Image (tube, rainbow, N blue to C red):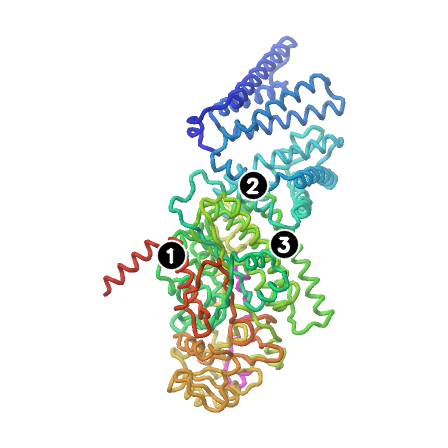
């Protein structure tokens, strides 16, 4: 809402003055009618308490008088309220005329008067008076794309379909009744008006109750809109609030289908709503003149896969960027481990030292660290951060494991354990949760995605597709959340951050990675999720082209790793890694539970966070869910493996895709090759010569050594004896494994599965058909797409002309930001620190 004092300084147009005067006269007329009614009641010996209609007349009159005063002061909220009241008056008048319940001449005059006042309220001079400069720019930009004959026709058809949908809703809701088609049409019109008027109100209310309160507000905001519209609609009766809630959700389901049909499955509705709800009167155009940068992470999308889809034309937005010359792209090497924690820590924080796998045994802490658990992610970030991460200069982190030292973070795992508010501004969530374009649209899409997963999983079985894994019930729900709800929420949060003028934004879309893990790297459902992200990129492009954000933005696409496909190790060889280790140690090989998906952790935490919120709505959510945060914490697997009666040692066996790790957890230091041979004769040989294992890495007296079935490779010196076990795993295998094996918490035995060069398949040590973590296939071949004029620094590339490692990519991204004028204060502080140390 614009600043009234600012409006007072502008010249008030005659249309605004006349509107305020007419509203005031209307209020005085209603007051006079109330007085006459009281006189009649007094003459008849009646009492005021027996005259509800008289009370209603006086209340409306007083309300109009307040509206008139605020119209004169330049309040846009008063104009909105007046529009709803006038709309209700027109609908009521027309309904009575159609149904024969009133005088035709009076009805015509009343409708004409209301229409005249509506015309004055929304005349261009009046609109300029009530709106701020930024609101006008946004309205003009968003409206310009719809001012075509085709769009106007579609809009008219959509309104007609909406009336039909309202009719269906009334028919299907037992507690709601309509006496005619005119009443139903009037209800549809009033529903649109109420929704338009009340959404900003609910946005403000929901913003004050934490982000979980925004979720809770969905039920009541939609119900209030429907209830008010149906209550004031003539000829429509609602039994009670409960039936209004039922009607609101029936209507939401129908309207989701209508919205999808009329937007061709695009994000038009979400773009328009999120943009309008992101208006900040206290955020003028960026004065620093710096161009913003939007980093979009295509989680798990490999460079070869992108090349395949570009050639096929299946990602039209990205393809257009490449073909037009606005962008170019290259491949970069993710290194080992090729996992999201290692890559995101390197990209966002600038360091991924000490991250040997997705989860690992921390010898100092004496427990397992899992990167997508909030408390562990916070520990990992604290170790990697120097305060100058990628997003340290006015950046925003959205749906990542780590924050990149951003000033604001939304849905960032490392911040979930910090208490209420750590997940970001509640207003940003409220804008999404309190409108049918947001959660009410995303929930039916989530259910649809779950239904698709059930069908597609069964179809793989019926067709005998190999390799495949069981797609269990918990994954069905997980896919629905990540591929619909989280995607839409991420879009809304990015739009909000752009409209707020963030200098840099980094958002992770996990859709493809999640589905490819269970369906396969190039299976249709996996590729469909990539096509959906391409649509999202088009939405961001449209917002940038409208020119309504406080600053201009360039888009950079990056993936954290790729994925490789193949049957699991257990499927291929009939035994698991921990069973082999247990057989040759006589001890307890504690197998870490099956793959806790990187995106799955975030999806589950969305529910958990509701119970942990300290806000009013958070506490209510906690009671409703029956969750106890302390009880949850007690069940996390962060303690040492339980002791057993067996005489053998306690051993932790972990799989991160086709990269395996074995820790002898009772030992405070790394167990050497000599000690392994002495304590567990035959273990090293059994693992190194297993047909499903490409090579293992252990620590010898001369340093880390890779051992294969017919030779070894001393990683420190590069000396090879016999056949080189790393020969089939690329030119970076030695350097990558040497670095990983040198980490303090590196496993006592690293394992990389075998690689089938004919099918380009690897064998995951967990139940995933698409995997990443080790070497072999596409999993280390990540992508980087950027504006054509942004050159890759040749001093950062390796002998193959590629960026190698997430830390190197971080330096390149930082250089691009600095070239755009970002990070000046950070660079000066770093230079001053270096000078003082020198």
Residues 219 and 9: in front is: 9
Q: Position of residue 159 (x, y in %)?
A: 68, 37
Report, in whole angstroms, how far the alpha carbon at label 3 lies from the one at label 2: 27 Å
In this view, the residue in front, 782 or 598, is: 782
Please name the residue that numbered disc 1 is placed on.
Answer: 818
The quarter in which the C terminus is drawn is: bottom left
Q: In the rendered structure, are the residues bearing label 1 and label 3 in contact, judged by CB atoms less than 8 Å apart? A: no
Answer whether residue 585 is magenta in the image. yes
Q: Nearer the viewer, mark 3 or mark 2?
A: 2
Distance Cα–Cα, label 1 vs label 2: 32 Å
In the rendered image, the residue lying farthest to the top is 43
Q: Which sits earlier in the primary sequence, circle 3 or circle 2?
A: 2
SS at circle 2: helix
The x, y position of residue 315, in whole percent, is 60, 59
Say the numbered circle drawn on residue 446. 3
Please tell me which residue lies in front, 38 or 250.
Answer: 250
Q: Residue at x 39, y 85 (%)?
A: 717
What residue is shown with label 2? 142
Q: Residue at point 39% right, 66% down?
A: 351
Q: Is residue 484 left or right of residue 775?
A: right
Above or below, 672 against 18 in this view is below
| Label at residue 156 | none
- Marks 1 and 2 in Cβ contact (< 8 Å): no
**Sequence order check: which comes first, mark 1 or mark 3?**
3
> Magenta part of the protein: which range?
580-605
Assign a secondary structure to mark 1: helix
**Left or right: 763, with 189 as reference point:** left
Queried whether the magenta region covers residue 349, the answer comes back as: no
């Amino acid at each position: 809402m614009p600043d009234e004092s600012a409006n007072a300084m502008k010249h008030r147009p005659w249309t605004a003055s006349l509107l305020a005067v007419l509203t005031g006269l209307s209020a005085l007329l209603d007051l006079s009618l109330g007085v006459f009614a009281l006189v009649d009641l007094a003459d008849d010996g009646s009492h005021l308490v027996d005259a509800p209609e008289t009370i209603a007349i006086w209340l409306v009159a007083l309300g109009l008088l307040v509206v008139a005063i605020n119209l004169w002061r330049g309040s846009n909220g008063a104009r909105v309220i007046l529009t709803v009241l006038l709309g209700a008056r027109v609908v009521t008048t027309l309904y009575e005329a159609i149904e024969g319940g009133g005088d035709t001449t009076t009805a015509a005059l009343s409708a004409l008067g209301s229409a005249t006042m509506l015309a004055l309220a929304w005349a261009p001079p009046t609109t300029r008076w009530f709106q701020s400069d930024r609101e006008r720019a946004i309205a003009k930009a968003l409206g310009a794309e719809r001012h075509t004959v085709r769009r106007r026709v579609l809009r008219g058809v959509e309104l007609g379909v909406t009336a039909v949908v309202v009719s269906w809703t009334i028919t299907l809701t037992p507690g709601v009744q309509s006496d005619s088609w005119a009443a139903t049409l009037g209800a549809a019109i009033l529903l649109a008006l109420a929704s338009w008027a009340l959404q900003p109100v609910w946005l403000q209310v929901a913003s004050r109750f934490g982000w979980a309160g925004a979720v809770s507000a969905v039920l009541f905001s939609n119900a209030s809109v429907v209830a008010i519209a149906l209550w004031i609609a003539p000829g429509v009766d609602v039994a009670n609030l409960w039936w209004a809630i039922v009607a609101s959700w029936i209507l939401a389901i129908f309207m989701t289908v209508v919205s999808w049909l009329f937007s061709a499955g695009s994000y038009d509705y979400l773009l328009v709503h999120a943009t309008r709800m992101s208006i900040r009167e206290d955020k003028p155009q960026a004065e620093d003149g710096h161009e913003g940068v939007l980093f979009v992470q295509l989680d798990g999308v490999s460079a070869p896969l992108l090349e395949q889809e570009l050639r096929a034309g299946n990602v039209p937005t990205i393809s257009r960027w490449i073909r037009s010359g606005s962008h170019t792209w290259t491949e970069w090497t993710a290194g080992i481990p090729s996992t999201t924690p290692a890559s995101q820590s390197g990209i966002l924080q600038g360091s991924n030292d000490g991250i040997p796998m997705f989860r690992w045994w921390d010898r100092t802490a004496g427990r397992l660290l899992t990167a997508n658990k909030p408390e562990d992610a916070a520990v990992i970030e604290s170790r990697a951060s120097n305060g100058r991460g990628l997003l340290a200069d006015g950046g925003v982190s959205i749906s990542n494991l780590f924050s990149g030292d951003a000033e604001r973070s939304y849905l960032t795992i490392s911040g979930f354990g910090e208490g209420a508010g750590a997940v970001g501004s509640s207003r940003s969530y409220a804008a999404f949760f309190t409108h049918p374009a947001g959660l009410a649209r995303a929930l039916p899409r989530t259910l649809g995605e779950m239904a698709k997963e059930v069908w597609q999983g069964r179809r793989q079985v019926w067709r005998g597709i190999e390799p495949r894994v069981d797609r269990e019930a918990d994954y069905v729900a997980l896919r629905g959340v990540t591929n619909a709800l989280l995607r839409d929420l991420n879009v809304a949060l990015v739009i909000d951050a752009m409209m707020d003028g963030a200098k840099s934004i980094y958002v992770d879309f996990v859709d493809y990675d999640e589905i490819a893990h269970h369906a396969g790297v190039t299976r249709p459902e996996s590729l469909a999720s990539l096509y959906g992200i391409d649509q999202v990129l088009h939405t961001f492009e449209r917002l940038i082209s409208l020119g309504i954000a406080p600053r201009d933005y360039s888009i950079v696409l990056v993936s954290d790793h790729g994925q490789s496909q193949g049957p699991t190790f257990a499927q291929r060889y009939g035994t698991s890694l921990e069973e082999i280790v247990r057989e040759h140690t006589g001890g307890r090989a504690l197998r870490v539970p099956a793959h806790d998906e990187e995106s799955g952790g975030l999806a589950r935490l969305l529910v958990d966070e509701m119970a942990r919120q300290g806000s009013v709505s958070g506490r209510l959510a906690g009671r409703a869910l029956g969750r106890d945060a302390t009880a949850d914490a007690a069940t996390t697997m962060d303690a040492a493996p339980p002791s057993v009666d067996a005489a053998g040692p306690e051993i932790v066996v972990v799989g991160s895709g086709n990269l395996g790790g074995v820790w002898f957890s009772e030992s405070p230091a790394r167990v050497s090759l000599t000690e392994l041979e002495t304590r567990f004769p035959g273990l090293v040989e059994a693992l190194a010569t297993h047909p499903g294992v490409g090579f293992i890495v252990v620590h010898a007296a001369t340093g880390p050594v890779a051992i294969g079935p017919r030779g070894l490779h001393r990683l420190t010196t590069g000396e090879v004896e016999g056949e080189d076990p790393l020969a089939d795993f690329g030119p970076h295998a030695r350097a990558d494994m040497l670095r990983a094996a040198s980490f303090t918490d590196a496993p006592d035995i690293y394992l990389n599965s075998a690689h089938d060069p004919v099918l380009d398949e690897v064998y995951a040590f967990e139940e995933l058909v698409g995997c990443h973590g080790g070497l072999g296939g596409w999993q280390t071949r990540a992508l980087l797409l950027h504006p054509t004029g942004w050159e890759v620094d040749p001093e950062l590339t390796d002998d193959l002309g590629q960026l190698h490692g997430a830390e190197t990519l971080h330096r390149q991204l930082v250089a691009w930001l600095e070239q755009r004028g970002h990070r000046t204060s950070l660079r000066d502080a770093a230079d001053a620190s270096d000078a003082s140390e020198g």
